[in-house]
Amino acid sequence: MTKTLDRLTRPKTIAVFGGKEARRVIEQCDKVGFSGDIWPVHPKNEEILGRRCYRSVADLPAAPDAAFVGVNRQLTIEIIADLSARGAGGAVCYASGFREAVSELADGNDLQAALIEAAGDMPILGPNCYGFINMLDGALLWPDQHGMLRVERGVAVLTQSSNIACNISMQQRGLPLAYLMTAGNQAQTGLAELACTVIQDTRVTAVGLHIEGFDSLETLERLAALSRMLKKPVVVLKVGKSEAAQLATISHTASLAGNDRVSSALLERLGIGRVETLPELLETLKLLHLYGPLDTADISSMSCSGGEASLMADAGVKRKISYRPLRDEQLKPLRETLGLMVTLANPLDYHTFVWGNGEKQTAAFTAMMQGGYGLNLVVLDFPRLDRCDAADWQATVDAVVAAHSATGANAGIVASMGENLPESVAEQLIRDGVVPFHGIEEALAAAETAAFIGAAWREPAPAPLLRHAVGVGKVVTLNEDEAKRELSAFGLPIPEGLVEIEPNDTGPAAEKLGFPVALKGRGVAHKTEAGAVKLNLKSKQEVVAAAYAMAGVSNGYLIEKMAGRPVAEIIIGAMRDPVAGLVLTLGAGGVLVELLEDSALITLPASQQSIAAAVSGLKVKKLLDGYRGGPKGDIAALEQAVEAVTAYLVANAGDIEELDINPVLVLPEGEGVVAVDAMVRRRIP
């Protein structure tokens, strides 16, 4: 049953335990005007900041909605047990030295288990956790400074890292922060569960997560469903791409980082946006706060210099956005406004002919914003306000706001260098409904992410992720013929073949199949390296001779009829990810596997649409489409083969540890595909 976190995150009464950290929590609540009751608990002090001190949980006037427990780890467990027994709404566990420090403190795991047991049904955040800031209600269980202001509506940002939360609180980008929350090492309550709570606050517009490790895929799926239902997008900064980051994650948070490409596949399946940096996260949240997901990835750009137009154009090359050409109906008003010397294009350099002329700028911006773009950007770097006169720049801002108001189009102002967009201007733009973007790369990342979420929401919601318990029994590697037989039962095309034990029997078997044939030694993991595979054997004598040559390394023979010349070779594989379970891999196969690194991951169960999208996204798709006049490959048969493999994986999900079908030969269109090699490692009871 899902814990109720509303009392904890939106408290009317707060209890604080400890010394200086508890005092700071009271100071922060007073500073922003928390209107509820705060009850300090201390064994010796009579009062703290004018409030009476209580001696224990039992002495409190009532069960608090939220508690900040800022004492040592042993005492934390005792207080948490008392709060749970009293019926408190939840607690922040500030202390460290639990599971996240298990390598230094041998009892860390035991203490964390004791903490969870002490909490019972009461929600706890942490341990090793700063807590959270709720600027909607002025409730701060936060023992430090921050840079936030009260807001009536805004975004929620959640992170496992308290220090990153501190950094985010100091942002000067105009982003209205409603909640800033940390989860520490997620002993009991994870980021996704917290996000499921705050996304349901009617005052929250979007949610951003800085994730070091997924706490619960089931809860992440619930968050994605709530996101769609409430029309509140979620965007994630997932760290752990590098080996160093993965090691730091494990030591710092005791979370399992998982495979980064699997993380991307999971988020893509769920319609959750992913960004690469903290600035991208904040800029994307600004866009989502004002406009939500974009209807299209088509964007426009205007600037008063060719250099800025080039920066915008070049930055868009690596993004899944489109500077769609201007429509015919835009050309006349733009020409009339900007004159004959301006080249009308997108991105558009409008030169300085209309600089400082608010009326003409408004007309030009309005014409651009009437083009049906998902987002309309104007590049504008402000001068230093302490040394320069920014009147003309403010006139440009006013023109953008006027054009946005006149058209209702999504609009943003982009400073090519983030420091050149003052916080006061950013805050004004947010109030006027225009996105202030700090940085070109960040603006385009935001547009790409918002367009992705929009496209994902226009598709049907995904089926629940495949869930299964890992089977029992010894993991064994099947013989190739055994693996192919199992896969063939689910519809995967395989070559016609026969199994023989003695070398002399391989010749008659080959004659029965018809030449040419392939001969493979059974029970050999790496056949090529061991000399246990021979191709294009054209006579009985060649087959028998090859069988005797590999007799010392094999325990029998698989004789198969050679397949036709393929258009392309594909690998279909599966691995067991520690977070997501079985995940399907599809990519360029044969000798191109390592060379091209051309592959896609598909989470399970897989839909026909996701399989088709994965095939279409491969680099080798150019070969399948008939590269330079060559024959087209049988793409439909390839997609059906992938469907057959996914059906096999779903049916045997608990037992499969690894699968590698390489290569799958894609024959010319209408001739099908054939899996000529297969390896399956699975549990056998």
Image: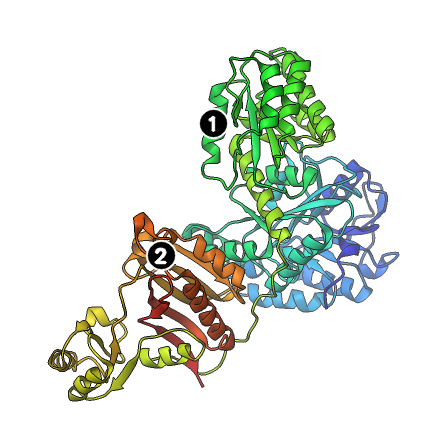
Which residue type carries mark 1?
Leu
For this orientation, the residue located farthest to the right is 61
Disc 1 versus disc 2: nearer the observer: 2
Q: Is the residue 9 above or below the residue 481 in the image?
A: above
Q: In which quarter of the image is residue 114?
A: bottom right
Instruction: Answer with left or right where residue 304 lies relative to residue 197.
Output: left
Q: Label 1: which residue?
A: 311
Q: Which of 143 and 266 is in front in this view?
A: 266
Crowd rating for badge 1 (residues with CA inside 10 Å; few <14, some 14–19, many 20+): some
Q: Is the residue 378 above or below the residue 22 in the image?
A: above
Q: Quadrant of residue 640?
A: bottom left
Q: Which of 522 and 405 is in front in this view?
A: 405
Q: Distance between the residues labelled 1 and 2?
A: 38 Å
Q: What residue is shown at x 48% (from left), y 77% (from top)?
A: 652
Do residues under tags 1 and 2 come within 8 Å of each other at their CB atoms? no
Q: Is the residue 428 above or below the residue 353 in the image?
A: below
Residue 632 tag number = 2
**Percent x, y of residue 311:** 47, 27
**Percent x, y of residue 295:** 63, 42
**Percent x, y of residue 186:** 62, 58
